[in-house]
Amino acid sequence: MDVRSKKSLRPNQRLKLVKELTIKGYKAKALRRVWIPNHRRDEKRGLGIPTMKDRAMQALVKSALEPYWEAQFEGTSYGFRPGRSAHDAIERIFSNIHKGSKYVLDADIAKCFDKINHDYLLSKVDCPHNIKRIIKQWLECGVMDKGIFEETDSGTPQGGVISPLLANIALHGMIKDVENHFPRTKRQGNGTVVWDYKPRIIRYADDFVVLHKDYDVILQCKKLIAQWLEKVGLQLKPEKTSIRHTLKSIEHDGKTIKPGFEFLGFNVRSYPVGEHHSGRTGGNNSTTIGFKTLIKPSKKKILAHHEAIKEVIKAHKKAPQSALIARLNPL
């Protein structure tokens, strides 16, 4: 049997596969579609699983491309990058709002991995022609779903080793391009100068937030981002995109929106407090700001965690205590 169709290999088969990992004559095979629950969005998503040989080849190409792109990516981009976690993104948000309340554009890109324009992506991948030809094969190799072949004319296959890197390459530049539309400082009508006037955009894969004190700037950013995404073949997801405020309720589109927002499974919100519990501006002339910023797990994630624990306990009712404890510990 061809080793490329197996799920695991013996050591001698691995050595044989290593010798086959050459660019010359390489041709990618179709992906295998697997449907899994997407707990972040309460729906199922399709993963395109490459063959073992294709996964190994993708890992090889990724190891060559990633160091270059890691040196190029924006500092506030966090998803699917080595040494950068969701907690790092949340910490960056906290550092931007704990000394001053902000308006927030909480946005989500609709079907990001499925809709990225192949021509645009390939035009950005800065690599030799023979490597780019292989990447194009991975993008266009098609999917087998229950024995039926489907062509892939857009998107990066979820389930591929190199797909997260390709998605980050496609979205690279959005943060800088939008921020550069705004001056670093701005003089207001009363003569005071607002330092650091640029909006702050924190992105984690296809989710991102925009932070700024000015509501009009948030609206401009929403428009600019939508325009920028068009050239990538993407658009914002209306039902997952909203404007909020970290400290106060606001009126938007005829609705009253409560303070705070949820991002990456966390609830981020500032609470009005008394003088002794208030945060401070810092510096030599430190003053109280009248609120305190708290970041907690979202209620939805807590309930999901409780449900997961409940299912384990139900499934191990007749099991020994040690078996139940061993299953619960990782949770």
Image (tube, helix red, strand yellow):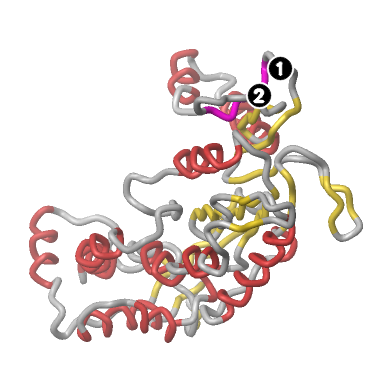
In the rendered image, residue 323 lying in the magenta stretch gets the answer no
10 Å crowding of disc 2: few (<14), some (14-19), many (20+): some
Badge 2 marks a residue whose secondary structure is loop
| Circles 2 and 1: CB atoms closer than 8 Å | yes
10 Å crowding of disc 1: few (<14), some (14-19), many (20+): few
Amino acid residing under circle 1: Glu
Residue visible at 46% across and 22% down? 329
Residue 328, compared with residue 238, is above or below; it is: above
Residue behind mark 2: 288
Residue visible at 28% across and 77% down? 126
* Residue 5 makes an appearance in the image: no
Quadrant position of the N terminus in the picture? bottom left
Q: Nearer the viewer, residue 159 or 85?
A: 85
Left or right of residue 313, residue 149 in this image = left
- Name the image quarter holding residue 19: bottom left
Place of residue 20 in the rendered image (x, y in percent of width and height, measured from the top left): 12, 72
State the extent of the magenta-drawn residues as a range.
277-282
Q: State the mark number for residue 275.
A: 1
Residue 236, compared with residue 289, is above or below; it is: below
Place of residue 235 in the rendered image (x, y in percent of width and height, measured from the top left): 63, 73
Q: CA distance from mark 2 to mark 1?
A: 7 Å
* Residue 106 makes an appearance in the image: yes
Place of residue 271 in the rendered image (x, y in percent of width and height, measured from the top left): 73, 29
